[in-house]
Amino acid sequence: MGIKGIVIMLGGLVIAFVLIFFVFIKEQPEQQISKQEQTQQISDQPLIEQIKWGEITVKNNGNTITYRDVKLWPNHSREWNWKETGTRHNPDIQIADIQELIDKVDVVILTRGIDLVLQVPQETIDYAKQQGKEVHVGQTEDMVKLYNKLVEQGKKVGGVFHSTC
């Protein structure tokens, strides 16, 4: 075999190596699994489609539901009924308002309403932080944007959302 034959053989080996390398990189199971897991996480979490005075529209598990005030966490959305815990503009958002979602999330969002009338006592924030949660408090429309952004990033997010004052 001459030099020309060796060059052709080496060229063929290089091409085979390159093809095998790209096929292996392209089809790594770890990448496919993480994309599937991320898609699953996003689809398991409700998204807020719209917020306007007195109405929060949520898409959850294929259903679109409108609430006045809402509690959200992965796979769940339900009316946030202030009467259950005695919440009002005073005594504000209670620890009891977030207890059913606290163990199911990594991030807790507490909204203060459109006009920032609803308050959040420091003890409620401290409780969530003591449970190891990242906590965000703010105006409802701003917190809706943050909530959806965090869900799209694959984070496990929950919160209580107030749609009026």
Image: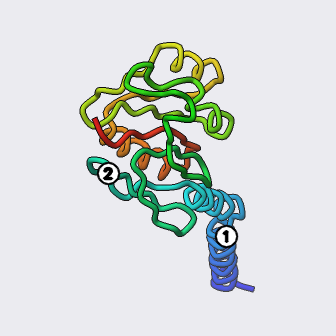
Question: Which image quadrant: the N terminus?
Answer: bottom right
Which quadrant would residue 2 be assigned to in this image? bottom right
**Badge 2: few (under 14), some or many (20 or more) residues near its Cα, within 10 Å?**
many
User: Which residue sits at x=63%, y=18%?
Assistant: 130
Question: Which image quadrant: the C terminus?
Answer: top left
Image location of residue 83, percent across then percent down: 51, 35
Image location of residue 148, percent across then percent down: 42, 49
Mark drawn on residue 107: none
What residue did someone put label 2 on? 51
User: Which residue sits at x=51%, y=68%?
Assistant: 63
User: Which residue sits at x=56%, y=54%?
Assistant: 45
For numbered disc 1, what is the local secondary structure?
Answer: loop
Please name whichever residue, 86 or 137, is drawn nearer the observer in this view of the structure.
86
Left or right for 12, reference 83: right
For numbered disc 2, what is the local secondary structure?
Answer: strand
Which quadrant would residue 140 be assigned to in this image? top left
Mark drawn on residue 27: 1
Left or right for 49, reference 99: left
Image location of residue 111, percent across then percent down: 39, 33
User: Does 105 appear above or below 152?
Assistant: above
Disc nearer the start of the sequence (1/2): 1
Of discs 1 and 2, which sits in the foreground?
A: 2
Look at label 1 and name its amino acid.
Answer: Glu
Q: Tell me the distance, in whole angstroms, between the alpha carbons under discs 1 and 2.
A: 41 Å
**Badge 1: few (under 14), some or many (20 or more) residues near its Cα, within 10 Å?**
few
